[in-house]
Amino acid sequence: MNQTTLEEFYQRIGSEALSWAEDYSGKMLVYAELDDGFISASLLYENGTPGEATFKYCPSDLEEIISSFWETWNDVPGNKTWKVMVYLIDSDDFSIDLIYPDQINPDETATDRRTSIFKIHFPSSRIDYSDPELEDD
């Protein structure tokens, strides 16, 4: 995987995530856990209401892009397989953190890990989990 391919994946992930956030305002996080044949991915974003963030499950198109990134990454000799991706958009900036299996506490559930990451990036926000599904055909 060359730098151009990597940047293309970053762009595709960010663009697709932003296209699904109806009332996005300021900060968005894409959280994904992957393994062979498995992905669990979600979005969390500021929605314009002070102190509130909206939770959504990722649509299948975004999951496919993330899975493709993971698979392409793993096809490169010498790349270490990661298990968790934390992709943060904050206004005009973004960052991506890849978390490897040896960095994961085996006593934590996937939900515990996701919740911990959410608290790090949205420490004072109340998270609205009331309507987590997106309408993706």
Image: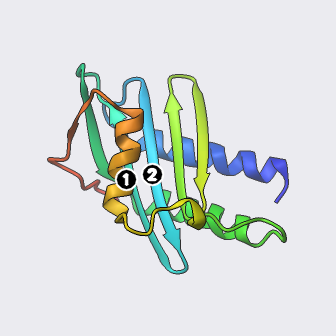
The quarter of the image holding the N terminus is bottom right
User: How many marks are shown on the rendered structure?
Assistant: 2
Which callout, 1 or 2, points at the residue further toward the start of the chain? 2
Find residue 27 and report its image quarter: top left
User: Quick check: 66 above or below 76?
Assistant: above
Residue in the image at 73% along x and 45% along y: 7
Three-letter code for the amino acid on which mark 1 is drawn: Arg
User: Quick check: 3 above or below 33?
Assistant: above
Three-letter code for the amino acid on which mark 2 is drawn: Tyr
Residue 109 placement (x, y as % from top left): 34, 65
- The residue that disc 2 covers is 31
For residue 8, side relative to residue 18 (left or right): right
> Marks 1 and 2: CB-CB under 8 Å?
yes
Residue 44 placement (x, y as % from top left): 35, 42
Residue 113 placement (x, y as % from top left): 39, 55
For residue 61, side relative to residue 75 (left or right): left
The quarter of the image holding the C terminus is bottom left
- The residue that disc 1 covers is 114
Crowd rating for badge 2 (residues with CA inside 10 Å; few <14, some 14–19, many 20+): many
- Residue extending farthest bottom: 37
- Where disc 2 sits, the SS reads strand
Residue in the image at 54% along x and 54% along y: 85
Say which of 94 and 80 sits in front: 80
Say which of 10 and 86 sits in front: 86
- Residue extending farthest top: 50
Q: What color scheme is it?
A: rainbow
Crowd rating for badge 1 (residues with CA inside 10 Å; few <14, some 14–19, many 20+): some
Say which of 66 and 98 sits in front: 98
